[in-house]
């Protein structure tokens, strides 16, 4: 069995790493995964600022290159180019999209605003409290109350951009789904998952049926895992 041409640097616990592994699994691209956390020695070995993920491309056109491609958006575009099918792009008329670029608008909004609201504001403080075992549920809720109120508004705004049913852009599974899902899977794993609306819950149930989601679930918060 030949060695995969690609290695992904990043723990399954990392939401951005999972966005990429979801796409690799969905498109049937074999890869190996080096599990490490942000700002670890391994992360800095592969990314100048120690962030995740990095895609190591071992070979191009039969030539060994071991090229390190950083930043999730660049990796997503590379994956689309080498494996255009099954497509994770959209066309006008998919959901509420009028132009194709609304896909990348959604992805950018999720990364720039959704990640800090979900992970930094709510999930990480909640998990730290659970692991610490010193604070009551009511004390944690009071501590993160401002972040929860902010997250409520953000989730409402995200939902406004989504199609009424199906995936983010209706019948077409896209990068938008693969960027949003890891965040909301983490949120659903903590008590604040109660913030998810019926529309978002239905969307998550649809996503959970995907083989790519099943394949990338081990090592994530949703099954009780913690970073290595």
Image (spheres, rainbow, N blue to C red):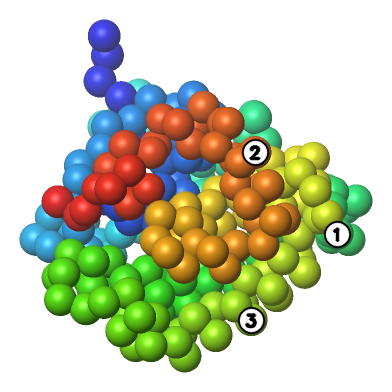
Where 130 sits versus 78, above or below?
A: below
Q: Is residue 97 left or right of residue 146?
A: right
Gap between marks 1 and 3, in whole Å?
Answer: 20 Å
Q: Is residue 53 left or right of residue 135?
A: right
Instruction: Give the mark, 2 or 1, whose residue is nearer the N terminus.
Output: 1
Image quarter for residue 59?
top left
- Identity of the residue drawn at 67% across and 62% down: 197
Numbered label attached to residue 23 = none
Residue 98 at x, y percent in the picture: 89, 61
The residue labelled by disc 3 is 153
User: Are circles 1 and 3 on residues that touch, CB within 8 Å?
Assistant: no
Q: Pointer 2: what residue?
A: 206
- Residue 71 drawn at (x, y percent): 40, 61
Q: Nearer the viewer, mark 2 or mark 1?
A: 2
Nearer-the-camera pick, 207 or 144: 144
Crowd band around label 3 with a 10 angstrom C-alpha radius: few (<14), some (14–19), many (20+): few
Which of the two residues, 193 or 137, is positioned nearer the viewer here? 137
Residue 105 visible to the viewer: no
Residue topped by disc 1:
96
């Amino acid at each position: 069995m030949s060695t995969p041409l690609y290695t992904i640097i990043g723990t399954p616990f990392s939401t951005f790493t999972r966005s990429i592994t979801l796409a690799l699994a969905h498109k049937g691209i074999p890869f190996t995964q080096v599990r490490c956390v942000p700002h670890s020695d391994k992360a800095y070995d592969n990314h100048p600022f120690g962030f995740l993920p990095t895609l190591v491309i071992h070979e191009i056109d039969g030539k060994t290159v071991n090229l390190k491609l950083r930043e999730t958006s660049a990796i997503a575009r590379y994956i689309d180019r080498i494996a255009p099918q099954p497509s994770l792009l959209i066309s006008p008329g998919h959901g509420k999209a009028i132009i194709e670029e609304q896909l990348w608008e959604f992805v950018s909004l999720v990364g720039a605003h959704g990640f800090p609201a979900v992970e930094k504001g709510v999930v990480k403080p909640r998990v730290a409290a659970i692991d610490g075992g010193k604070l009551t549920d009511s004390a944690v809720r009071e501590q993160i109350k401002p972040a929860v109120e902010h997250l409520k508004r953000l989730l409402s705004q995200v939902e406004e951009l989504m199609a009424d049913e199906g995936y983010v852009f209706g019948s077409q599974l896209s990068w938008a789904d693969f960027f949003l899902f890891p965040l909301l899977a983490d949120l659903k794993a903590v008590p604040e998952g109660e913030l998810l609306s019926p529309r978002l819950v239905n969307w998550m149930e649809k996503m959970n049926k995907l083989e790519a989601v099943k394949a990338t679930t081990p090592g994530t918060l949703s099954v009780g895992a913690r970073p290595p």
